[in-house]
Amino acid sequence: MKKQIIKRVMGPVLCVCLVTGCAFTDRLPFLNTEERAVETINEQAQTDGQNAAEDVPAGDENQDASKEAEELLTRVRILNDSPDLQESFEKLANAYKVESGVETEVALATDDVYRSVLEAGNKKEKPATVFMLHSKEQIEDYDAFCENLSDAPFAGKVLGDSFVCKNNRGEVRGVMLSTDFYGLIYNRDILSAYMGLPDALIYSVSEIDSFEMLSKVAADIQKHKAELKRRTNLPVKGAFTSSYIDTSSGWKFSRLLLNDAVYYEEKDGMGVFSKKLRGKYLPQYKEVLDLMVSNATCDEKELQEKSGGSAVKEFAAGEAAFYFGGTWSLNNILGSGKITASQMGMMPLYFANEACQEGPGLLNATYVCINREAKERDKEAALEFLDWCVTDADAQKILMDEMGYILPYETVSFEEYGNVLLKDAMQIAQSGAVMKEDRYALFPSREWEKAFEGAVKAYVLKEGKWDEVEAVFADQ
């Protein structure tokens, strides 16, 4: 986009356009989902039509002057898809208006009417300039609306290529504004005690840099658990917490761990927006699963009684060196035992794939896009707004503290985050590691996930065979 110098001919008037329509009725029961959203859009269209009809007589000089001023006015129009964040987005818009003098509007349209609102704005020649998407598949679907952000200044400030989304032509269509990370949470005291053993396999946590090394260290921790219990004065029972495969947290195996297998399959060009996954990395999935089960705080026959809560309590009590979770797990762990935040760290769950330097996985990503249908000066203003969002201290405070966003940008100090797991994940990302992206949209269906989860549970409990897991995976 060509840099333009805009002469602002109207005083700033903040116009907040609120289009309601909420898919999250459990959180906002007073909103009437799709009907109110569509009704609001229709009413606005009728009003626009009436106003157009009433704008005669032709030649009205005041009308012409007003129209000309409107045409010259630069605006940033944000289309937000989360009702919970609407108030904070409006605060962000107000702050930017004060900072820059640019008119900034916020509209709300949840996923059931999101595309309709975006298209309606384009038809009225007042499109949203900034909008949010949440997966690579969504960005492919909305490709016609997405401006190429390859040279956008704010895009150049992300921690690595894992935080931008490119289309099949290699053009950056979305840039991650926020994400969570998942991987292995570890107990620093237990690992320190292990590294102090005369025959320890590692002398630094950073030496665990592959599945091969993780598996060797886990097996060695299991072997020395009695000695580690004595050295730490903690009730060490195993390398990993119990593998909690009941319905309360089986999703970690049917989603988080399986996501790695699907991510690498797509990376190899085998599952890109295809209707059928081939399961190329199911053997690696099995290796990781077997590692966690065979080096856990209990044996397979006890797993029937375990749950997600059991695993959290085991880790919080110091019974295990590793817990499979994410940056969101911190408060839950802290509230379940005597462990402190300073005793925890985070590393990747290495997925038996030695082709790249693995980082933690990405989850709950929010990509920001710029509408290619907007006026050039509005697109330029949107670029300046987004750059302000990731560089200005006040903007970062709203995004991080009020909205809970995790900003994967080099302009954000890790020390700004109180979450120690997040600090570790961000440092790994800054080192250039490949972060495994959320590929859930490639999963055939939620029903398929549940069937896979059930087959994995039967396998872990020795009530089923591994080939039954493979058969369920292939049944797409």
Image: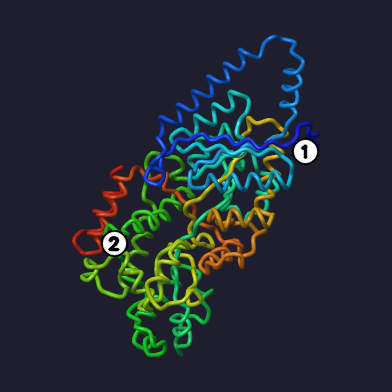
Residue 80 located left or right of residue 410: left
Residue 272: percent from the left, percent from the top? 46, 42
Residue at horizontal 40 percent and vertical 78 percent from the top: 338
Q: How is the image coloured?
A: rainbow
Q: Residues within 10 Å of mark 2 (few under 14, many from 20)?
A: many
The N terminus, quarter of image? top right
Ranked by sequence position, the earlier of labels 1 and 2 is 1
Amino acid type, callout 2: Ile
Q: Quadrant of residue 252?
A: bottom left
Amino acid type, callout 1: Lys
Residue 223: percent from the left, percent from the top? 35, 82
The residue at which mark 2 appears reads as 245
Q: Which mark is residue 3?
A: 1
Residue at horizontal 54 percent and vertical 41 percent from the top: 80
Q: Is residue 147 visible?
A: no
Residue 149: percent from the left, percent from the top? 65, 42
Residue at horizontal 36 percent and vertical 55 percent from the top: 282
Q: Is residue 203 visible?
A: yes
Q: Nearer the viewer, residue 143 or 76?
A: 76
Residue 202: percent from the left, percent from the top? 49, 80
Q: Nearer the viewer, residue 418 or 225?
A: 418
Mark 1 lies on a secondary structure that is loop
Q: Is residue 395 above or below residue 13?
A: below
Q: Is residue 459 above or below residue 12?
A: below
Q: Is residue 343 above or below residue 332?
A: below
How many numbered callouts?
2
